[in-house]
Amino acid sequence: MPEALTRHVAITVDVEDWPQSSWDRTLPITARAATNTNRQLDFFGEHRTRATLFVLGKFARAFPDVVRRMEREGHEVACHGDGHEVVFGHSRAHFEDDVRRAKSLLEDLAGRAVTGYRAPDFSIRRAQFWAFDVLAELGFEYDSSMFPIHASRYGVPAWPLSPTRLMLPGGGGLVEFPISIVQFAGRNWPLGGGGYQRLLPGFLFRALSEGVMKHRPFVLYGHPYEFDVDEFRHLDLDIPWRVRWHQSLGRRFVPARLSAFIRHYGGGPLRDLLPRLEFPDFDPTTIAES
């Protein structure tokens, strides 16, 4: 595989439970989430690939042995907050408490500092850029919450497409790794994983991804539940059929498509990119309110 295309590819996973993270945040984490995560860890082991795993505190509290396995097998344990609460729905104090609690738990389980963070639902909007200061104050080295698209629930379309070092009022050196997008017809379109990887044909997803890799690092993301084809047959919740259909569509292709992606381009944890890249400075306050 071409070295130019393998050097700066990050594989990331948001470790969460679909019912709790996407339907009702008051629900407990189910055992199915642990099963799915172990299945994905088996997959990475078979492909000799390490990844950044953004873990919910709520998941870690329920399944500490799975988090210990992540660390034991060489993955990067990173923070996804505690209860999958969107940042724009809470105050700065609440956000700090949520992240501090999850970070402390994950560090106890992993036995090392947790230096990466991703907001649930990519939910740091322009009005919540204070979250970057909080993350720097808590000792994080990087964030990966920015999705440079316009979407109904998330996205900052004016955000730089390549990783940058944020210029923060407190002087912190936080690096931002945005989710990868593709530009077409004057717009930014989502590409970097999740449902976008499920719904695009595999050959098209790889072709578009390869085009991005020629210009900047590629950040891919996914979820363990996307490996679970039968999940919605067993969920005893009042979920509309359209949601069930959309959220399950394409799951059966995910393992093969991720396997092909890794086979073509490799990839590894985000922390491995920190010493290998130069990050231009960027001042988030230059982005206008949207």
Image (cartoon, rainbow, N blue to C red):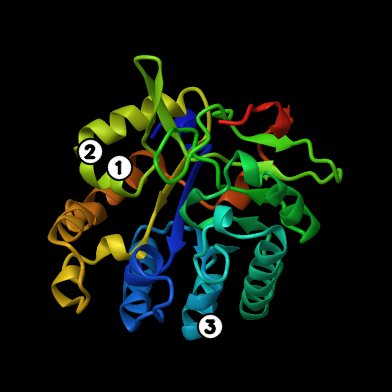
Query: What residue is disc 1 on?
Result: 196
Disc 1 secondary structure class: helix
Task: Please identify the quadrant where the C terminus is shown.
Answer: top right
Q: Residue 203: horizontal and vertical position, in percent? A: 21, 34
Which comes sooner in the sequence, label 3 or label 2?
Answer: 3
For the residues marked 3 and 2, what is the alpha-carbon distance in whole angstroms? 35 Å
Q: Return the residue at label 3.
A: 61
Q: Is residue 127 above or below residue 94?
A: above
Q: Helix or strand or loop: what does disc 2 sit on?
A: loop
Binning the other alpha carbons within 10 Å of mark 3 as few (below 14), some (14 to 19) or many (20 upward) gives: some
* Residue 137, picture quadrant: bottom right
Residue type, label 1 = Tyr
Q: Residue at x 33, y 64 (%)?
A: 43
Residue placed most toward the observer, 288 or 136? 288
Residues at circles 1 and 2 in contact by the CB criterion of under 8 Å:
yes
Residue toward you, 76 or 57: 57
Residue sitting farthest toward the top: 185
Are discs 3 and 2 less than 8 Å apart at CB? no
Cα separation between marks 1 and 2: 6 Å
In x, y percent, where is residue 105? 64, 78
Q: Residues within 10 Å of mark 2 (few under 14, many from 20)?
A: some
Residue 84: x and y in percent read: 49, 65
Q: Which disc, if any, is residue 200?
A: 2
Circle 3 sits in a helix, a strand or a loop, which is it?
helix
* Quarter of the picture holding the N terminus: top left
Please say if 42 is above or below 138. Answer: below
Mark seen at residue 113: none
